[in-house]
Image (spheres, rainbow, N blue to C red):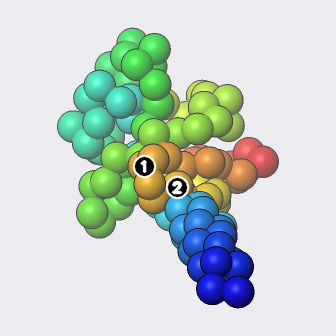
């Protein structure tokens, strides 16, 4: 009985950990950069460099804390390199990644989903 209870507890903790790794859907604002340059392009004027360095992987640099998040599904953000955006998606805290479900370029006020 103790083994069964222990096994149940372990499985519950593993499932809870997985659920916490991928948080709920959230909305954040930030700059689209690349993984090489990171937060150094979290401002206007970095578009050309971000486009040149995009092969390193695209990143979202969140406003406020300037945390650099690797974008899991870069196809959602193509065309917004170096732009200030508002995105809706899910953060994976363990991997430091962001899965985007919707993006709005702040200067254009256009939607992409």
Give percent across and percent down for residue 57: 46, 25
Q: Residue at x 70, y 52 (%)?
A: 102
Mark 1 Cα-neighbour bin, 10 Å: few <14, some 14–19, many ≥20: some
Is 19 left, or right, of 48 in this rendering? right
Is 20 left, or right, of 47 in this rendering? right
Give percent across and percent down for residue 100: 64, 49
CA distance separating discs 2 and 1? 6 Å
Mark 2 Cα-neighbour bin, 10 Å: few <14, some 14–19, many ≥20: many
In this rendering, does residue 21 appear at all?
Answer: yes
Q: Residue furthest left?
A: 40
Q: Residue at x 64, y 78 (%)?
A: 3
Asked if the residues shown at circle 2 and circle 1 are in contact, with their CB atoms under 8 angstroms apart, the answer is yes
Quarter where residue 42 is shown: top left
Tell me the residue that label 2 is attached to.
Answer: 92
Helix or strand or loop: what does disc 2 sit on? strand
In this rendering, does residue 23 appear at all?
Answer: no
Tell me the residue that label 1 is attached to.
Answer: 96
């Amino acid at each position: 009985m103790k083994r069964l209870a222990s096994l149940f507890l372990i499985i519950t903790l593993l499932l809870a950990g997985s659920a916490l790794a991928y948080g709920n859907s959230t909305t954040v604002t930030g700059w689209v950069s690349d993984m090489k340059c990171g937060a150094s392009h979290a401002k206007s004027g970095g578009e050309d460099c971000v486009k040149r360095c995009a092969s390193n992987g695209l990143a979202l640099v969140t406003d406020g804390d300037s945390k650099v998040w690797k974008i899991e599904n870069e196809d959602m953000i193509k065309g917004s390199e170096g732009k200030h955006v508002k995105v809706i998606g899910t953060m994976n805290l363990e991997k430091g990644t962001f899965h985007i479900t919707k993006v709005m370029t702040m200067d254009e006020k256009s939607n992409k989903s």
